[in-house]
Image (cartoon, coloured by chain):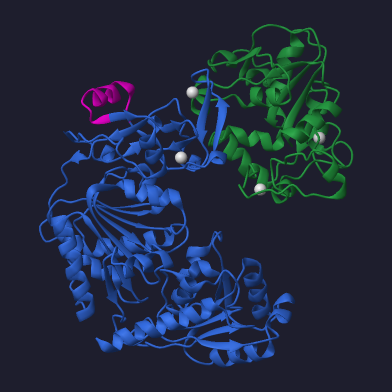
Chain colours: A green, B blue
Amino acid sequence: MRCLICHVETIPDVTWVTFWKPSVQKKICQECEEQMDKITASFCPGCHRPGHEGVCHDCEKWEKTNPGLLERNVAAFPYNEFNKELVARWKYRGDFVVLDAYKEHLQNVWLSSFFKGRQVLSVPLSSKRLDERGFNQSEAISYALEEEPFSVFERSHSEKQSKRGRKDRMQSENPFRLLHPISDPVVIVDDIYTTGRTVRHMASLLKEQGCPSVSSFTIFR
Amino acid sequence: MFKTVKKYLQKDFSWIPHENPTHSYPSLTGKLLLRHEIPYEDEIVDQLLAQSILVKVTSIESYPWGHRCRRCGNTKSYLFAKMPHATCGQDCLYCRSCIQMGRVIECEPLFYGSSGFEWTAHEHPCHWDGDLTIHQQKAADELVSLVQKGSGEKLVWAVCGAGKTEILFPALTEALEKGKRICLATPRTDVVRELLPRLQKSFPDVNIQALYGDSPDKAGDAPFIIATTHQLLRFAHAFDVMIIDEVDAFPFHNDVSLHYASERAAKPQASTIYLTATPRKKQKRRIRSKHLPVVFIPQRFHGHPLPVPQLKLTPTLHRYLQKGELPPKILQIIVHQQQTKRQLLLFLPSIKIAEQMASYLKERNFEVQSVHAEDSQRAEKIQAFRKKEYRVLITTTILERGVTFPSVDVYVIDAGHVVFDEAALVQIAGRAGRSPDDPTGDVIFYHIGKTDEMLDAVESIRYMNKLGRKL
Ligand SMILES: [Zn+2]
Ligand SMILES: [Zn+2]
Ligand SMILES: [Zn+2]
Ligand SMILES: [Zn+2]
């Protein structure tokens, strides 16, 4: 078995405990696993920002400008340098199978997030991007979580149109269009939560159309 | 079935189209490209396909027992993966080995560009007015006749500082006069960058292009290409003259895909020249069995022998290195060395130790910098050392090749470490005594016990000096 990331041979270590159980084939080596890290212990309850006690500054700001728009974000891994490079390999080079490196822990975090049972929504890609990449990263993550994603958004092309009404900045810059309303609680699945703007764009459309609660689930924060 | 197995086991390029219609697209000539690497709209591409100037070829060969990526030659099962492919709706296999250069996926073809572009024949392309030594001239003549003959290969075994670039000039001239296309491939970006201005100066009217990871030039549409070996992944049957520099060096040595690509990039009737200062065992075997014609250049261009390394046993070395320090004896020697005119090149086995040593020496008021492979300021630091802006350069093995300084002493700390193999040690020793104004220099290997690699390196240097004296 080779490490999915660095391709070194991984040897499952045999101890007295593992000797009697069927050994679990590790997809990644220990060194890569350590570098991928995990978000544990302290994190912001609003966005899962790692190494943070209590609500972070970003979340406070969002609550001031757009209160209650996003219920919370759950993330599994910190967006560190190592992971940044892997994301580049996965998304921009198109090495699809890199996602498998995150899968096991991602599924565990998903189960402990209590999002299971909610409607899972995917983030749309422009058709040009989709063609280059060959896959939609948000859908790929949903399938890795063994969930069926719903595609209810599309990328809106005409930016001029959206400049007409400027009552809400959030809305005037919204790159998405909601194709049909959803009346159940939802969770948006994506790869990275950075500023939180993307999911809130989607959340604002959903809520306008009567969605009771919007959360998000990402690999990285 | 037997044929299929053989095709899989051997390098097989019979899939490259044999018809090469003439055309006027230099950027497509002898290329193997993904669709998005072709800078034309679908309409034009369709026309080129109709004229067989471009030909679609299968990108991944499938066998009952495995696959081969035709761009990089990868056959390792763990370097292939499947993905649900949105573009075609199928589960498609792609190559992970060469994905850095864009994804090769089984449902999309590679595009071969006909090598039928006519390159201009240059009249008197070489403006270099230096002289070759007798040994250099002899080697140069042999390379000229190889280029005249067409197909064939030759290894140039030249000591560090033999002036092997200049040895190529007559053969390059011969090729350019006949309108032949040349590629000079080397594993290192540094060397590509260094060679471009030198060659451009000597061949001022020739369009020479440098291709490497982030080179400003990407087109690859020149008659004379200097490239890192990785860039050859985009060429097929392109070159009449293929020169591979530092065949023994990482990553070329042992990298199957680079061998595959460099063989494919040459035309079937190409002249192939290998340059090395330190042939590996496999090449030495081929030389001994007369399967690989060789030409020796055992003497440096300035005629002085290579400095022979001194081996110095330092039993306490590891104890001090663990603390990020040097044994007092070595420190004392460096203090003395620094009172001479020569600069000092200090080789250490790892980046971590190199950096520790830099701060250790800085604290003791030495003018010192450390540099390593991923250092973003690498080029600047090396340039500054060359301009003598500081006195001690600490580095790991990455600096061992291609980079020259006029007047240095060279110390290797912990020369018994596994990173210092014979080839690396010969190259490191070859940094000293490069200039005719200062043709010697102290080369010292500090160690805690002699290794075979150290002894082989010393023996190989002595052997070359002996050959040089005989001439
Ligand atoms: Zn690994
Ligand atoms: Zn937060
Ligand atoms: Zn490949
Ligand atoms: Zn496909």
Q: Main secondary structure of the magenta part?
A: helix
Q: Is residue B65 left or right of residue A35?
A: left
- Is B261 in front, or is A220? B261
- Is B168 in front, or is A80? B168
Query: Picture coordinates of residue A143 (x, y %)?
Result: 68, 22
Q: How many marks?
A: 0
The quadrant in which the N terminus of chain B is found is top left
Q: Is residue A170 left or right of residue B10?
A: right
Query: Picture coordinates of residue A133 (x, y %)?
Result: 53, 28
Point out the residue furthest to the left here.
B123
The answer to whether one can see residue A7 in this image is yes
The answer to whether one can see residue B213 in this image is no
Query: Picture coordinates of residue A102 (x, y %)?
Result: 71, 36
Is B87 included in the stretch rendered in magenta?
Answer: no
Above or below residue A109? Residue A120 is above
Q: Which residues are magenta?
A: B40-54
Query: Picture coordinates of residue A66 (x, y %)?
Result: 78, 23
- Is B215 in front, or is A204? B215
The quadrant in which the C terminus of chain B is found is bottom left
Point out the residue furthest to the front here.
B2
Q: Determine the image quadrant of residue A69.
A: top right
Residue at x 35%, y 85% (from the top left corner): B465
Above or below residue B385? Residue A136 is above
Is B41 included in the stretch rendered in magenta?
Answer: yes
Above or below residue B369? Residue A189 is above
Q: Determine the image quadrant of residue A79.
A: top right
Residue at x 49%, y 19% (from the top left corner): B88
- Is B140 in front, or is A168? B140
Above or below residue B63? Residue B328 is below
